[in-house]
Image (tube, grey):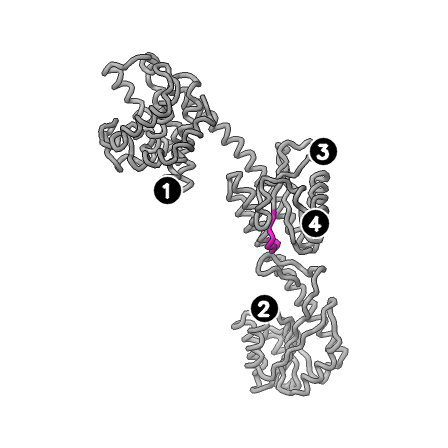
Amino acid sequence: MGVLDDRLEFAAEPARALPPWKVLIVDDEPEVHNVTRLVLGNFRFAERPLELISAFSSREAEQLLARHDDAAVVLLDVVMESEQAGLDLVRTIREQIGNQFVRIVLRTGQPGQAPEHEVIAAYDINDYKEKTELTAQKLATTLYAALRAYRDMRTIEANRRGLEQVIRASTQVFAHHQPHQFASTVLAQLTDLVGVEGGALCCRISRPNGALPDHFHVVAASGDYSRYVERNADEKLPVHVVQSLRNAYLHRQHVFGDDHYVLHFIDSNSSEALLYVGEAHAIDEVARRLMQVFCSNVAIAFENLHLTQELFESQLDMVYLLAGAAETRSQETANHVRRVGLLAAMLGRLHGLDEKTCELLNYAAPLHDIGKIGIPDAILNKPGAHTPEETAIMRTHTEIGARLLAGSRRPVLRLAADIAISHHENWDGSGYPRGLHGADIPVAGRITALADVFDALGSRRCYKEPWPESEIRAFIGEHRGTKFDPDLTDLLFANWDSVVALRRNLPD
């Protein structure tokens, strides 16, 4: 039985020298130990010899079993320090030590004190022999049967544990819905399953056409292979490994080498991925089947991730278009709302918000002005200044937006509702619609207000031209502590180059 640490366990690994079977002889007569060792000295089962361990009392046997929990067979005398010592040890092994795998062969020289039918019925033993009937041949036969049963039980247990590991690993894979997390999660679970320390890497072929690509580009890696990310695996890995990558891609199947695996995945969009696991141990057919189960689950998760991401991106495009159109009844501000979302998420991270909240900010902040959908065109697109009456109407967009969004149970839309109602509140309490002051303003509203003003000042509108960067910075600095949260303003200035770069990378 081959064991890869306490990770996924597989049956015998042909590439390794297998350890001997441990057999514990428990008897208070030294001559019994000597004879047993003489008879079994050259015994072998499944190409593995025996390691014979001696105990001369039940107490000593208990101590040895605690140290050798992989003992395969116990040859146990009944009468030792007491008439029931052997039988008491059976209960200790099964109930206190909790070892259900070791095969217990009871050997007695006084069958009348421990009748076979009573012992078999009352105690969890696997065989009962009188010492007088145990010839060399019968002892060997008994040991063959015991070792075969032990091996099969351990194999079943290893495969059960292996399947549990596959299920747990698959659960971890299904739990990650972000593309950048997916590949690294699969790599981590895969290397843990097979018990390798060197690591693994993932190559992605985005637009396969059936022909071999020029290179296998590494998009994710773990362990020793992390240095190959964004490089070409075929230029870094040994020739025989590169050949496995090619075979896996050309034949659309997994490749199991003696020292590595290459696993192939494909989704309905014909996007393909190859996972390479290096410095791996050879595994048998049962282990390969378990690996196939894991691979099948990964393929399903890969497919679901692609479909979910495609649906999410379609919905996000719609949000951006609607949010942009709501501001001016056109699409000219679609990239403005995208930038507000990205900048809000950036400021959130700089402010120390958790990643989940920052991700929600990215999608919720663009909806800050969705309430403008209820503002008449004549007011919304008026090129000049608003009258007091028009200003009052214009300001209702915060409450309109909050009402539109607040009815949803979705966290992103609930956050968007908080932003819609609070992004025109000012730090000094002079804002609207509720005149909130300082930290009473939700942090998402404070962040979005700063992101919105920064980007809007640099954008062209029907009533103005874009401002130069120097004037934008001067305006924001002038309103630090009055309109804007001073700490957020300082973070914006400290990261000014990154903020400006974000705008340049996504122009109107």
The quadrant in which residue 385 appears is top left
Q: Amino acid at mark 1?
A: Gly
Who is closer to the viewer here, 117 or 204?
204
List x then y, in percent, for residue 460.
39, 18
Q: Which residue is mark 3?
A: 211
List x then y, in percent, for residue 113.
61, 85
* Residue 425 visible in rendering: no
Q: Which residue is mark 4?
A: 256
First along the sequence among labels 3 and 2: 2
- Which image quarter is the N terminus in? bottom right
List x then y, in percent, for residue 32.
68, 85
For the stretch drawn in magenta, the main secondary structure is: loop
Query: What's the magenta region?
Result: 193-200
Who is closer to the viewer here, 228 or 70?
228
Q: Give the SS element for disc 3.
A: loop
- Which image quarter is the C terminus in? top left
Q: CA distance from mark 3 to mark 2?
A: 54 Å
Q: CA distance from mark 2 to mark 1?
A: 52 Å
Q: Give the SS element for disc 2.
A: loop
Judged by depth in the image, the label closer to the viewer, 4 or 3, is 3
The quadrant in which residue 156 appears is bottom right
Residue 48 lies left or right of residue 268; in this view the side is right
Q: Which residue is mark 1?
A: 352
Judged by depth in the image, the label closer to the viewer, 4 or 2, is 4
Who is closer to the viewer here, 347 or 338?
347
